[in-house]
Structures are given as structure tokens and as C-alpha cells.
Image (cartoon, rainbow, N blue to C red):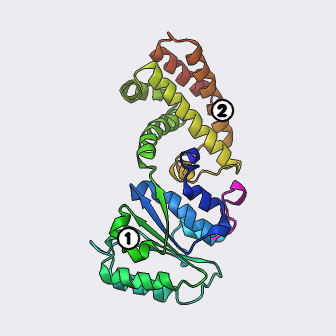
Amino acid sequence: MLDDFKDNKFYEYACNLKKYFHAYIFEVSDIDSTYPLILAFAKMIICKNHLTNNKQCDCNICHLIDENYYNDLKVIEPDGKQIRKEQIKQLQNDFSLKSANDTNQVYIIKEAEKMNDSASNSLLKFIEEPASNIYAILITTSRDSLLPTIISRCQTIELNLTNKLTYIEEDYQNNLKFLKLLQKEKENTLAYLKSSYFSIYQTREDVLKSFKILEIILDKEINRRNNIISDFAYYNLLANELKNFSLEELIFYLNKIINYHDKLIKNPYLNLILFMDRLVIEISREGIK
Ligand SMILES: [Zn+2]
């Protein structure tokens, strides 16, 4: 998935630590699906090791951020329908003290277009006189609803991954479900094939697509375990799903899937139902002990 935004400015900023601006606007088409990426970006501002050399950082700070316990990263969300001035004031107070952790301080404002006028004006003052270690990230689905004076002081990054990600996500979920069932339920997965899988993946093309996704999932997770991951969106979405798989299992499944994928490509007239049944049975019987 990283390829999806490789041409995107996000990647450029994220990879070039020296180019930080003090305030960013992320204009997104959907907040939930892009938030993991934006959070990864915030992490990089705070922890210099995060994702350097394409490695996911394992430090205390990064863990605290993941668990929402890091007090030099503040997230502001609408309080009801609006973001109010008091919320911005509170933030300024919280950040007026030097970071106890001696790191950069980052605040994220979700749905920034919901700031009312007085909140916007308070924020503007805050952005206008940035302390050297404070960074702002505003997330909005509609940049034009922000004060022009705020926009002009921020670096805007457009993240329009939504359509693609939503599409992939759905397919990812289906295939993850299949993988997890296969690991847990072994041959009982045959019932799932009948009841669900084949209603989603009906044609040979569909099944080829499913194999492709299974390979991507497994390949990326194997890479992530080996610390060669550089794909924020991916690990936030999927790593947790595969936590019960050992590395050996992932490799075993990947080899099987590649092998069957190959068979399917070479034999255009395979009976798909028998073919998938055989895959499930073979994996269940041979599976990692
Ligand atoms: Zn770290």
C-alpha cells in the first residue's frame, strides 16, 4: 500500500526529517481511514528513530503513543458539534511547559473545520508564534472551511487514499478472515468456503484476486516481522489481525498460496470449488505443528 502514496507529498515529508514545517493541514476525504498514517507522521516528529531506515521503532515513547499515554502528543476533537476556544486554550496551557520528555510536542486537531471563530482565532495566534519544539497537525475534510490566515501558515498535504483503501480494506478483511479461519478451524474452513467465500469470489478472476491479496498480506507481515517494513497504513490495519501467526506459519501459508496461485494461473479450466477445497485440506493436514 505504500506505493499508493509514494508520489504523495506525505511520503516526501515523512522521509525527510529536516524539512519539517511547524504546522500542517492534512486534507483528507475520510478521517478514519487516513488517521493511522497521520499518526505515524506525528510519531516521526516526536521520535527521531521512528521508521528511520524503514524500521518501526520499538522505543518507550513510541509505545506510549500507541497506547494513547504520551503527554507530548495531544489530540483535539470536536466537543459536540464544535471545537471550542477553551479546548485550544487548554492545549496552549498544556504545551506552555517544556516537554517533560525533552521531545518535540505535537498536537493533532481532528475535524479542524469545526473550530468556531474564537477557537480559530486562538489557534491562529498559537500557530503564528510557534515555539521551536511545537508542531501542529490539522485534519480536515474541507480545507476551505478553515480561516485563510490559518491555511496560509500551514503546509497542506492532501491524502486522498480513501476510495482505494476502503476497497482494499474490504478485500483484505475477507481474505484475512479466510486465513484466520484456516489457521484456527483447519478443515472446518470448507464450510466457510461454501457459505461465504464463493459468494464473494465467484469467478476465476475473483479467486486470482483473492490469492494476490493473500500473498500481499502474508508477504508484508513477514517483512514487518523482519523489520523491513516501510508501510504505515499496512501495519496499522493488518499486523494486529495476524498476531496469532508465528513467522514459520506465515511463511508456510505464503508458500502454499504462491504454489496454488501458480496452479490456478497455469490451468484456466480448474474447477474452482474442488481447487479451493484441496488447498484447505492440504494446508490443514500439513500445517505447522
Ligand atoms: Zn520511538
Q: Give the range drawn in magenta.
A: 47-58
Give yes or no for residue 263 being in the magenta stretch: no
The numbered mark, 1 or 2, whose residue comes first in the sequence reads: 1
Q: Residue 22 carries which label?
A: none
Q: Which tag is nearer the camera, tag 1 or tag 2?
A: 1
Up-down relation of residue 50 to residue 207 (above or below): below
Residue at the image position 59 percent from the left and 67 percent from the top: 43
Element type where label 1 sits in the image: helix
How far apart are the alpha carbons under marks 1 and 2?
46 Å
Observer able to see residue 246: no
Residue 221 appears left or right of 227:
left
Residue at the image position 62 percent from the left and 26 percent from the top: 258
Q: Is the magenta stretch mostly helix, strand or loop?
A: loop
Up-down relation of residue 260 to residue 44 (above or below): above
Instruction: Please name the amino acid that badge 2 sits on.
Output: Phe
**Mark 1 neighbour density, 10 Å: few (under 14) some (14–19) many (20 or more):** many
Residue at the image position 46 percent from the left and 60 percent from the top: 35
